[in-house]
Amino acid sequence: MKIVIDFLHPVYRAMRSDGIAEISGLRTRVVVWLLHRMFILTRGMTMGVRAACFDEAGRVFLVRHTYVPGWYIPGGGMERGETALQALAKELQEEGNLEMIEAPELVHVYFNRGASPRDHVLFYRVTVTQTTPRKPDREIAESGFFALDALPDGVTAATLRRLGELAGDAAKSDHW
């Protein structure tokens, strides 16, 4: 982990933007609003998992969804009866054909007030391997590993904040 943090620190400063807002634009706001209204009926609180996934070369894996703009750290919601680590393994497999090659490290727990006043995110850091390249489908438009000094255009602000926290360039916030 120290090697990755040492690698992240100088590179993170070279990132060229503050990212794009995650919940912006009418379409995105409507989709998020509708999903969370549905969740009110099925869940008392929503809990999700996300992970900064690094390959052995130190590149980070990002996904671009079809239904919201921007590049994200992979992850998703926890289902009833599912542990956080089961949800994490499931989401990494679904979003990137990723397998964890070491135990994930819990970095922090965040309140995701931008999505809902009831949403929380468990954020992990993990080293992964990709079993096969992830083909685009109805959920994932693009995905891939990126060097930290060559991130794609349109990385979300939250993704950049999390990478900055991992690099030690920013204090951990309690808000996603």
Image (cartoon, grey):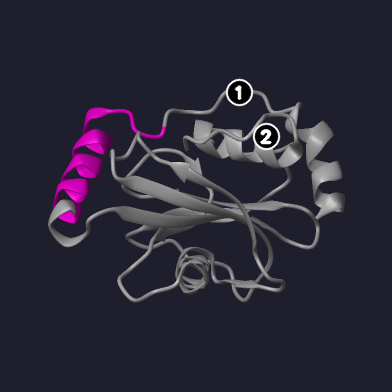
Q: Is residue 139 above or below residue 133?
A: above
Q: Is residue 158 left or right of residue 113?
A: right
Q: Is residue 94 left or right of residue 46?
A: right
Say which amino acid is labelled 2.
Answer: Gly
Q: Is residue 46 left or right of residue 6?
A: left
Does the stretch in magenta take in 176?
no
Q: SS for tag 2?
A: helix
Q: Is residue 117 above or below residue 51?
A: above
Magenta highlight range: 22-39
- Residue 17 — which label? 1
Tell me if residue 142 can be seen: yes
Residue 17 coordinates in the image, percent (x, y): 60, 23
* Label 1 environment density (alpha carbons within 10 Å; few <14, some 14–19, many ≥20): few
Residue 148 coordinates in the image, percent (x, y): 72, 41
Q: Nearer the viewer, mark 1 or mark 2?
A: 2
Kindly identify the residue that appears in the image at 37 percent across and 63 percent down.
Answer: 137
